[in-house]
Image: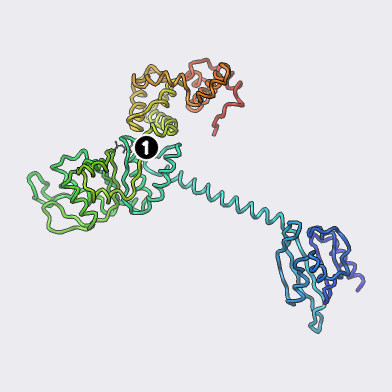
Amino acid sequence: MGEELELMLAKIIETSNNNITITDEHGTIVYSNPTHWTMYGLEADAYIGKSVYELEESGVLSPSINALVLKEKKEVQILQHTTSGKVVMSTGFPIFNKEGRLVRVVSYSQDQTEIVKLQKQYQQLQSKMAGYQTEVEELREKEASHHPILFRSSTMQHIFTTIQRVAKTDASILFLGESGVGKSTLARYIHDQSERHKEPFIEVNCSTIPETLFESEMFGYEPGSFTGAHKSGKQGLIEQADQGTLFLDEIGELPLSIQVKLLKVLQEKKMMRVGGKEERHVNFRLITATNQPLKKMVDAGTFRFDLYYRLNVIPIRIPPLVERPDDIPILLQHYLQLINDKYNVEKKLHATTYDLLVHYEWPGNVREMENLLERLILTIEDPVIRPEHLPIELQKTRKEAVEYPTSFDANREEKKTLKETVEEVEIEMIARAYQQCKTTYEMAEVLGVSQPSVMYKMKKYKDRLRLNTT
Ligand SMILES: Nc1ncnc2c1ncn2[C@@H]1O[C@H](COP(=O)(O)OP(=O)(O)OP(=O)(O)O)[C@@H](O)[C@H]1O
């Protein structure tokens, strides 16, 4: 039986996927399967009869798991980094005889290099996933807001990141920027993302309130406080915004007399209605916006400097569209679709019209774009909006648009043949038409060519057309 057992053990050790080493109480190897010693960077050899202490001393094993078990007299597990760059997990345990004397140490080692590598890759994937997760959440938040906030430019991405960071705080925000750039939309977005989103969002356009009515509108009034006042009195806009957000648009139009009162409310978080005797506590987050140079108004004495510094905690300038042309295509597509849906029509932009719109400076920014598209969709009978349908100021950009399409680099052009240039223009126009059309027939209409011609060109350029088919 003893011999049989030994043969069995020898077979098990030999065929095992692990490197198994058995030593006696002196550290001399009595059994081993040297095939696996390659993981230590050693040629397969007979190690039986060698001392683990000697192997340790010569640097073959550093440290030797069996030597460690002999020292500790208990199970030991270690991770070894071998000279050949492998990572080996070794486990060793002692075997005691009936008298409790340690007689053998058995150890088995497994090459973990691949597992460690996979683990690292897994961790990298996980951190990538976390990044994507954040991106998805950002997109969801963007969509969940009242109006989607669309952009492609890095400038707006930067602003959007800042807005998301400050939305959850109570800090006052001052939006600066031309009319129609999206200040009100972003103010509303901040409210929707804040802890106050279930409370009111009160938007006040300071330029539309006559100076004489400002105080009663903002602070409300008690019954019978002035002629023409409502009998039961009235809650002012500040009180309405209690617990929520007060958004004062066109803050530069706030009369000086109201500026003083607003500053007091901001400092004391208390206010009094017109004709009232008791102060009321108010708690609101303030967001303001202006297209006026507020700092210059402070210097000129038409805006209080102390109020300016209160409002200017986080100033955010929204650049006009002319400074972020990368945002124009996505906004055009969005509003074209939105207005088409609103009027249940399917108007398309002729490729040149699209070019002209992309090159236009949009002095009235996104609002102007929205209004123009709505007007065009409602007033043009043709299914395709052609360049001649555009207002004259837009047609002025026509020459440049045709001569210098967006993707062209004037310097590069010189080195190109006419054929190459024509092909580039064709590719660009086909790609744009593809984006806004559902069928090749519609594309033909937009491009002003026949449908077979569209099919032919799409086939011809199929490798160079980067069509977004998702
Ligand atoms: N990034 C954007 N994505 C989608 N729509 C936008 C974007 N920016 C602005 N808009 C739209 O443009 C229109 C004008 O925006 P908004 O009223 O927010 O501009 P504003 O800067 O507050 O203008 P004003 O100073 O005249 O009040 C709105 O219909 C708004 O939804």
Whether residue 247 is situated above or below residue 6 in the rendered picture: above
Q: Horizontally, is 449 left or right of 85 in the view?
A: left
Residue 444 location, x and y as percent?
50, 18
> In percent of the image, x 46 and y 43: which residue is there?
139
Residue 203 location, x and y as percent?
27, 44
> In percent of the image, x 32 and y 30: which residue is there?
364
Q: How many marks?
A: 1
Q: Horizontally, is 466 left or right of 228 in the view?
A: right
Residue 33 location, x and y as percent?
85, 63
* Quarter in which the N terminus is drawn: bottom right
Q: Horizontally, is 462 left or right of 329 in the view?
A: right
Quadrant containing ligand 1 reads: top left
* Amino acid residing under circle 1: Pro
Residue 470 visible from this viewpoint: yes
Whether residue 58 is situated above or below residue 429 in the rendered picture: below
Residue 14 location, x and y as percent?
86, 62
Residue 348 visible from this viewpoint: no
Residue 152 found in image quarter: top left
Q: Which residue is mark 1?
A: 319
At mark 1, the secondary structure is loop
Residue 251 found in image quarter: top left
* Quarter in which the C terminus is drawn: top right
Task: Confirm or reject: label 1 Cβ below 8 Å from ligand 1.
Answer: no
How packed mark 1 is, by other alpha carbons closer than 10 Å (few <14, some 14-19, many 20 or more), is some
Query: By what rule are the colours in the image chosen?
Result: rainbow
Q: Residue furthest bottom?
A: 99
Residue 368 found in image quarter: top left
